[in-house]
Image: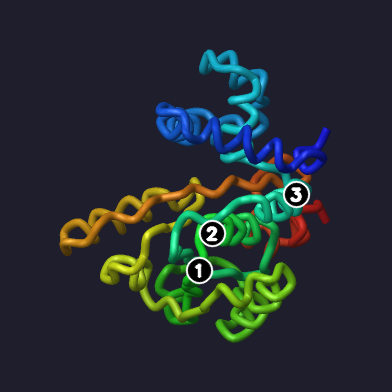
Amino acid sequence: MKVTDCPELYVILSESIRRMPTYREKREYVIRNLITSNYLLTPQELSIILGITEGEALVLLRDIRIWYYEVEEEILLSKYYKPRFKLAGVGGTFDNIHVGHLALLNIAFRLAEKVYIGCTTDELVHKLDKKGDIESFEVRRRNLEKALRKYEWIERASIHPLEDPYGPMISESRFELLVVSPFTYKRGTEINEHRIKRGLNPVYLEVCPIVLAEDGKPISSTRIRNGELHPNGKVR
């Protein structure tokens, strides 16, 4: 049974579980200690490890890791959520737009009314020493806009050149939420440290799920550039 077979019920279940006092603590534990060493962890296994119900384990795990074919399901589910924040920030290179990028953007638009998207400039790509033949900023921006239009997010989005790893997140009070991946969570905590030093409130950090490709490994632009995967997560 897919969660989209009864989306309203799943949203009610998932929101009630997310409101549990220990939910974020459990999620952080799974991110730090379990998921990167076992991407194929099942809800049944997680329920035994944490001593929780399979229903709670299902929601917890789906918040942390989904398969490539579940991204569209998650985008459909987002229609049943009401945004809790005014403005979210997300950042990335957005090279070879793929389902992992869509999962990141989906969480941002699910939780916030407006989303500020920082897209790394060609200069920053060079400074970060990213490997492979990365598309130009204009190509990446154009493809990002195309994805935003496809999923009807464009009216709620603004795209900006990202010239340093932190962007305006460390200096502007208007941001309430930052969406990161499990691999960039540390950057999110650094941003909050900078905000606190500047007398700003920390932003709420939301971790989007890791997206597994058809081969059971995380999808990434690097793997697509290397010819291993299609942007939809299928193996070449």
- Left of 212 or right of it: where is 184? left
Q: What is the three-letter code of the residue carrying label 1?
A: Val
- Left of 226 or right of it: where is 16? left
- Asked if marks 1 and 2 touch (Cβ < 8 Å), the reply is yes
Q: Please state, as top left, top right, bottom left or bottom right, where the C terminus lies in the image.
A: bottom right
Residue 57: percent from the left, percent from the top? Answer: 60, 25
- Left of 13 or right of it: where is 20? left
Q: Please state, as top left, top right, bottom left or bottom right, where the N terminus lies in the image.
A: top right
For the point 47% across and 56% down, which residue is it?
Answer: 179
**Residue 73: image tag:** 3
Q: CA distance from mark 3 to mark 1?
A: 21 Å
Q: What is the three-letter code of the residue carrying label 3?
A: Glu
- Asked if marks 3 and 1 touch (Cβ < 8 Å), the reply is no
Q: Along the polypeptide, which appears first: circle 3 or circle 2?
A: 3
Q: CA distance from mark 3 to mark 2?
A: 16 Å
Q: CA distance from mark 1 to mark 2?
A: 7 Å
Query: Badge 1 is on which residue?
Result: 115
For the point 69% across and 37% down, which residue is it?
Answer: 10
Q: Would you call the spot at circle 3 few (<14 residues within 10 Å), some (14-19), or many (20 or more)?
A: some
**Residue 94: image tag:** none
Q: Quadrant of residue 197?
A: bottom left
Q: Along the polypeptide, which appears first: circle 1 or circle 2?
A: 2
Answer above or below: position of 169 versus 140.
above
Depth check, front residue: 169 or 100:
169
Q: Along the polypeptide, which appears first: circle 3 or circle 1?
A: 3
Query: Badge 2 is on which residue?
Result: 108
Residue 194: percent from the left, percent from the top? Answer: 23, 60
Please tell me whether mark 2 sits on a helix, a strand or a loop. Answer: helix
